[in-house]
Amino acid sequence: MKPKTKDLIRKIIYGILFLAMIIAFVYLSEKYADNSKDRVLTINDYYSQIDNPKYEVIRGTKLISLLKSGKNIIYIGSNTSEFASKYIEELDTVIRETNVDKIYYYDINNDKAQKNSNYYEICELLSGYLITTDGSQNNLLAPSLYIIDEGEVKYYNIETAAMKNTDTPEEYWTAEKESAFISEVTTAINKYYLNNKE
């Protein structure tokens, strides 16, 4: 075979390989494009029993800004806590029966485990509305519910945030406690969030 023919065949093979690589790159980039996008989490990702579009999952930085301004309902939970799981079931009953358009959900696990600056700033902003434990420190615990209006806590409920291990959520949440909780939170939402004068 002549050197010019060999050179031509080599260029054709390189051209075909180069074209194949471009086609493979385009195909794979389209196929896996969804994996590169940030997935928007929903409440159902944390609590499989809750499927309500009124919940918006937020991170620590967004929680900090919501605590400083606006009128907001914020549920601080922990998807690893049985009490938080039962609490949100009770809360969801109220959310579905009121005119709440949005409730923000913040899962405490990541920031609390890291004890990062978000966690300490959130504790500072909610100081006075947190649980005092044996060490006499204010601790941000889940489940906790807050109604905030322009940086001021108007209502908070930390009813089961520091439960001892003597009760299970099912034992704690009797029909009477469920009814009292629903009534109290409904009244608070109507008064402090919806501005209904009742």
Image (cartoon, grey):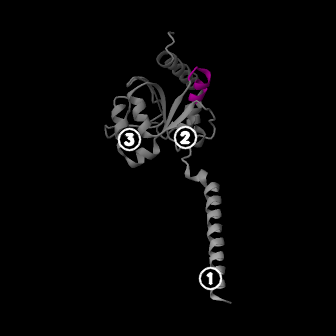
Discs 1, 3 touching: Cβ within 8 Å = no
Magenta-colored span: 90-100
- Find residue 16 and report its horizontal and vertical position in percent: 66, 71
Q: Which amino acid, by three-letter code, is at mark 1?
A: Asp
Q: Nearer the viewer, residue 29 or 178?
A: 29
Q: Residue at x 40, y 37 (%)?
A: 140
Q: Circle 1: is it few (<14), some (14-19), or many (20+) Cα within 10 Å?
A: few
Q: Which amino acid, by three-letter code, is at mark 2?
A: Glu
Q: For residue 12, what is the image quadrant?
A: bottom right
Q: Secondary structure at mark 1?
A: helix
Cα distance, mark 3 to mark 2? 22 Å
Q: Earlier in the sequence, mark 2 or mark 1?
A: 1
Q: For residue 91, what is the image quadrant?
A: top right
Disc ID at residue 119: 3
Q: Circle 2: is it few (<14), some (14-19), or many (20+) Cα within 10 Å?
A: few
In the displayed structure, 114 sits above or below 47; it is below
In the rendered image, the residue lying farthest to the right is: 1
Q: Which secondary structure type mostly characterizes the magenta part of the structure? A: helix
- Find residue 183 and report its horizontal and vertical position in percent: 55, 19
Cα distance, mark 1 to mark 3? 66 Å
